[in-house]
Image (cartoon, coloured by chain):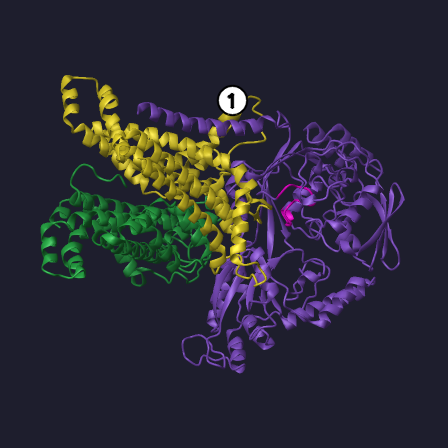
Amino acid sequence: MKQYKNNKLGLVGLGLLIFFLLIAVFAPYIAPYDPHQRFDSTEHPNSEHLLGTNHVGQDILSELIYGTRVSLFITLFASIAAVGIGIFIGLVVGYFKRFDFYLMRLTDLFLTIPKLPVIIIIAAFMLPSVWNLVFVFAIFEWAITARIIRAEVLTLRHRNYVEATRLFGAKDSHILAWHIFPYVVPLVFVQLVLVSRYIILAESGLSFIGLGDPTAKSWGMMLHDAFAYPTIFISDLWMWWMLPAGLCIVLTILAFTFIGYALEEIVNPSLKKSPWI
Amino acid sequence: MQTNVITKIVGYIIIIFIIISLNFFLPRMMPAGPLSGLTSSTPPVLEQYITYMVDLMHGDLGWSSSKNAPVWDVLIRSMKWTLLLVGSSTAIYISLGILLGAVSAWKKGKKTDVGLLVLFIVLAAFPPFFLGMLFIIYFGWRLDLFPRFGAQTLYIDYSTAFGTILDILHHLFLPALTLTLTSIGVIYLLTRNSMLSVLDQEYIQTARAKGLGEWYIIRRHALKNAMLPIITLVALIAGLAITGTIFVETVFAYPGVGLLVSDAIAAHDYPLLQGAFLFFAFAILAVNFTADRVYELLDPRVKED
Amino acid sequence: MKKIMALLMMALLLCCAFSGMVVANEEGEMVAVAEEGEKVVKISGDDWGYPTPFAHYPRGPGYIRMSFMFDTLTWKDEDRVIPWLADSWSASYDAKIWTFYLHRGVKWSDGEPFTADDVKFTFDYVKEHPQQLNYDEQNVDHVEIMDPYTVSIHLKESRPAFIEDVTGSIPIIPEHIWKDVDEPGKYRDDDAVIGTGPLKLVEYVPEQGYYEYEANTECFKGHPIIDLFISREVSNDAIALKAGDIDVASFWGKEIVAKEEFENDPDFEIITGPSWWVRKLYFNCEKYPTNIKEFRHALAYGIDREGFVKNVMHDGAIVANTGIIHPDSKWYKDDLPGYEYNNVTANKMLDELNFTDTDGNGVRNYPGGEDIEFVLFANTIMNAKDEAEYIHENLEKIGIKTEVRMMSSKEIDPILNTGEFNIAISGHGAIVQPRKLYTFYSYKNDEYNELYEKQLKTTKEDVRKECVGDMQTIIADDLPVYALYHPLMWEVYNPDKLDTWFYTKDGIAVGIPIAQNKLIFLFDPWRYDANEDGIIDESEVDDATQDYDDGKITSEQLDMVSNLYYP
């Protein structure tokens, strides 16, 4: 905790993330309008619509604020689900030798499968909905977490205190929950941030090529609409329609990047950091 | 080593099998699928599956309704453009990324290092399609420096192959730049980290103390040892860039397989989408496989296994 | 290790160079590219298939790209049906035998002469191998060759509208090329695009949506006024037009915003046309509860078509005729019921039908207690997502819950055919002539079908008009579909490149609403008839002389104008 406080980048990232989270949570109170409410279309920014209105007359600022909700919802739910699956498999595989071979082959399989193409093709065949996106991401993002947790558990289970607890006849579930899991928590956080960063990028891409949920517009979906608009490039519309949505994505990704850096520095203080950004 | 290689190859075969099967079963399982209206008069699934496999072996990927042509033909004629785009940007970002990563590590903490670090971390946070749209607006429209769409100007006679190639490169520039800038960060950081740990080693310190030239040390000693971890991840990065073309080609109307993906999604042309999916999946697998082999050749420890 | 890295890099570069070479090589084989001083005109468009009558995509732009090479017996200009491959024609009193007197001296672009044999061959051939965009060819019984330049087409049933409906849309193909072709859809040789029209196809690059045509200097209608005509793919028409990547762009419906952007730009000119297109809400008249006529009426009252046109279409459309036929068509029947938006009426009607919200969740319930909830199928044509959302919101206000599901035409047609739906949004063009097309997949109405058959066969125009009017009344009243809007369309062009664009009377061929009629390529001396009195007088000849001096027309063409001076 203290270490984190000393990391400036980490604090900036955390600040940004909290900022977006607050917007997401309090969207109905912050947004000037219901994002589905219609006004005149493609109005330029004015006192009533700070970022103007979109092609069907919805207030862009409100859309952006509610879009935070959708984007972060998908990202956080999917990454928690993915990391959750990863933790479970990692713990089980690492601790109980008898599952190791098959589950690790499965993990390897999921690690080698070309993720994004598979996610795109599955998303294309499902009805576009927020939950379906969460589901696909969760299914294809757990493997790396599982592998990392397993490696950690393998070293932990041979530590003296774990061996000792087992000798005293403690149940496996008890040992896993109280003597192993707490030690992998920092790793879990790093994974959560890593996976979130990937998912928000992938989600915006999927929405951009038309696989998003049209009833719950994420930032990527807003960019999709803007890109399809005939005069987006030659008029000034892009400045308040395309740019804010794009920058929100960029800032959120940066937030995750910074937090990830700070956490890695704590968990893995050697110089050999993983190269993700 | 032998068993290791065999396990890996078996793994790849299983994955190829899974991908192909996924391609077969998805349209038959999903509610939004094109076959949801089919009645029971179709042959049993197993029979369909075998037919599908046999067709696939013959390069028969079905008929693209939106392009009114066999999916295979559509893919083949688009493929060269995707190869050109991915190939050129990969060559650039790998070489440039390694170079700048090494420079950055060497100048650790100095202005150059910090500047590059910030630049690449921020760039890596840009979704490729967003960066591409900004480039179209600024370089394509405001400054009118580069073509905004397409891959070549077919109706102008350049009379020499050189002129044609120049025209193709002119069209390639913005898409390739977008792909390069959004992919370069990973390899840059990887090289930087890897180099930093190597530069810390005693023999480098000694070399430095001896007063050997900077570039000499970087090339002869540091980079050589920092290379191994880089190669392990090149596959991962190449995979990212390959899928990145889907978004870049969409924005620039660049006529590759990536554009086919978004076209197929918009037109609900499932056979075409599935064909493009196979292309991307196999391309990434091929890159992974190659990187695995190269890694084994390079790393003595793997050989001893 | 360095060697291996170097090898890898080399491999990558080689890969680039290779694909570059492949591209460059393909380029090398090409001929006829723009040279200094040539008149090149560029339009935008995707890949619409190989432009033969059998291989282009069965949609308007595909037909257009084919029609530059392939001619029909008759054609249309801005105002009327005009002679084309046939100089004149006559019909038997029962409209069953049609005789065409062909233009003499027409040559296929490979030099072979065009004769009556080609016409007979075409009509025989299309009965076995239907072309992509026409219909009713099966009604042709046989074709009789009277002499090398006269053919009689014998129909099974009388067709007073044979000229408008059939001969103006079936492209004639050369017998000497197609006679041995068994699978015309797959025939992609260079010879497959040999026609008689004003342009010749030079190059087709499907993945770049690229078509390149050159002038057919031997065209029987005269030397085209352009040298090269290009159709290429861009991802955004507006920026491509502004930047000069293309010289003309078509916008329609909600793309009105793009047209507005060009209105203040002195470099561009704009023409407006009807689109002969309609967006419709389909009701399944066989399935409960949309089989209840009053229920359909209630939904119609609950949909704000005026608000729709204003807010979703940005006034780039007009509220549709509930009888479907376009108001600009001569068959249009006015004063049909319009179902003016009225929530109160809609709610009252639904209440009377006993569809009330019994559980208070804001959604009406069937008498059995279930929520009234439909899947709203919507066609992806013209980006209908926003439109479906608007209908969804409208219906929500009268307590009908819908879930929007987007589908391509290929997917939605079987659904409409099998009747596995309650409501759906789709659209189609060519709403000029009364057609069976307007009847609806699951809709069966004997009276309507009888009227349809009757108007098809009657040779009396007023009887036909009455029938068509009654057909519209039936649709508007029974409401198997509720027509929403007819989009407008605009052609924005750079007049320095080409300024002959126009909208064809009743649409090109079967009713394609695109301003790219091949007549734009041909020199039309009547364009100099400024006061439209049919005579080109002295000052008008002066204009032509000026155009000759400016290099816009050739000396041959100037002679043509001069010959029309006091004809």
Residue drawn where x is 44% and y is 81% of the image: C358
Chain that is purple in the image: C
Question: In what quadrant of the picture does the C terminus of chain B appear?
Answer: top left
Residue A149 falls within the magenta-colored stretch: no
Residue A76 spot, x, y in % from top left: 29, 55
Which residue is label 1 attached to? B162
Q: Which residues are magenta?
A: C49-61
Task: Kindly tell me whether residue C239 is visible in this rendering.
Answer: yes
**Crowdedness of circle 1 by 10 Å Cα count: few (<14), some, many (20+)?**
few
The picture's colour for chain B is yellow
Q: Does the stretch in magenta take in C58?
A: yes
Residue closer to the observer: C478 or C416:
C416
Residue C373 spot, x, y in % from top left: 48, 71
* Above or below A216: residue B173: above
Residue A112, x across and y down, in percent: 35, 44
x 28%, y 29%: residue: B100
Residue furthest front as drawn: B3
Q: Nearer the viewer, residue A46 or B105?
A: B105
Instruction: Tell me the subunit letter for badge 1.
Output: B
Three-letter amino acid code at the position of disc 1: Phe
Q: Looking at the picture, how far across and down is residue B50, in whole percent?
A: 52, 51
* Visual hue assigned to chain A: green
The secondary structure that most of the magenta stretch takes on is loop
Q: Quadrant of residue A31?
A: bottom left
Q: Can you see residue A225?
A: no
Counting the numbered discs, the total is: 1
Please name the residue shown 15% across and 47% down the image: A4
**Quadrant for the N terminus of chain B in the image:** top left
In which image quadrant can residue C465 be found?
bottom right
